[in-house]
Image: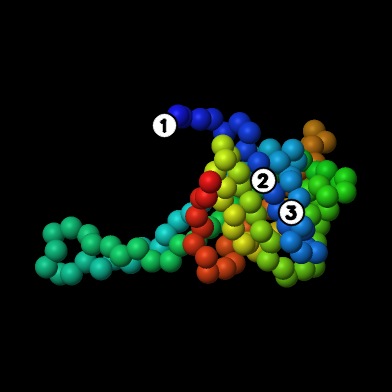
Amino acid sequence: MTKENGIGFAVAVDDAAGPTAKTLSNDITDLQFSTPRGVQDSTGIDSGAHERILLLADFSITMNGIFNDEADKSHAVFKTIPSTSVTRTVTLTHSAQILEVECVLTDYQLSRAAGGELTWSVPGAMNETTVPTWTT
């Protein structure tokens, strides 16, 4: 087993027109994602410790980046979030490991800082019944 850093992470997101993945890795400065499972406490009154049952799987993501209005880049992909209700494939790739999830992207937040930086943040959540699974 080899430990690795996060350099070389790749992110692709479908545009609103359909299954046309756009690689946005160069526009993204950082991201956070999680693959949590729900938990139900099933502890009986005769137990001295908690008992739990795993429930449904989930996925959430927040991508942050720098404004880029070139064709097929971040602004072109995300500008339709407020006006369309489409599911988009989000694909995360690192070291030949791939996590592909159908998501709803819920906001396209733009921020212009005092120093002139124009950045964005896009949160998303899983929108399907397939459990998020890393593949090689």
Q: Which residue is mark 1?
A: 1
Task: Give whichever of 22, 117 is nearer the camera.
Answer: 22
Left or right: residue 28 versus residue 47 is right
Q: How would you rate the neighbour count of disc 2 (Cα within 10 Å): few for under 14, some for 14-19, many for 20 or more?
A: many
Q: Is residue 19 among the parts visible in the rendering? A: yes
> x, y (%) of residue 83?
80, 67
Q: Nearer the viewer, mark 2 or mark 3?
A: 3
Q: Nearer the viewer, mark 2 or mark 1?
A: 1
Q: CA distance from mark 2 to mark 1?
A: 24 Å
**Between discs 2 and 1, the one toward the N terminus:** 1
At a point 73% along the width and 57% down the height, the residue shown is 14
* Residue 68, quarter of the rendered image: top right
Image marks 3 and 1: residues in contact by CB distance under 8 Å: no
**Between discs 3 and 1, the one toward the N terminus:** 1
Q: CA distance from mark 3 to mark 1?
A: 31 Å
At a point 60% along the width and 44% down the height, the residue shown is 93
> x, y (%) of residue 57?
45, 62
Q: Which residue is mark 2?
A: 11
At label 3, the amino acid type is: Ala
At label 2, the amino acid type is: Val
Task: Give whichever of 78, 100 is nearer the camera.
Answer: 100
Q: Which residue is mark 3?
A: 21
Task: Give whichever of 87, 48 is nearer the camera.
Answer: 87
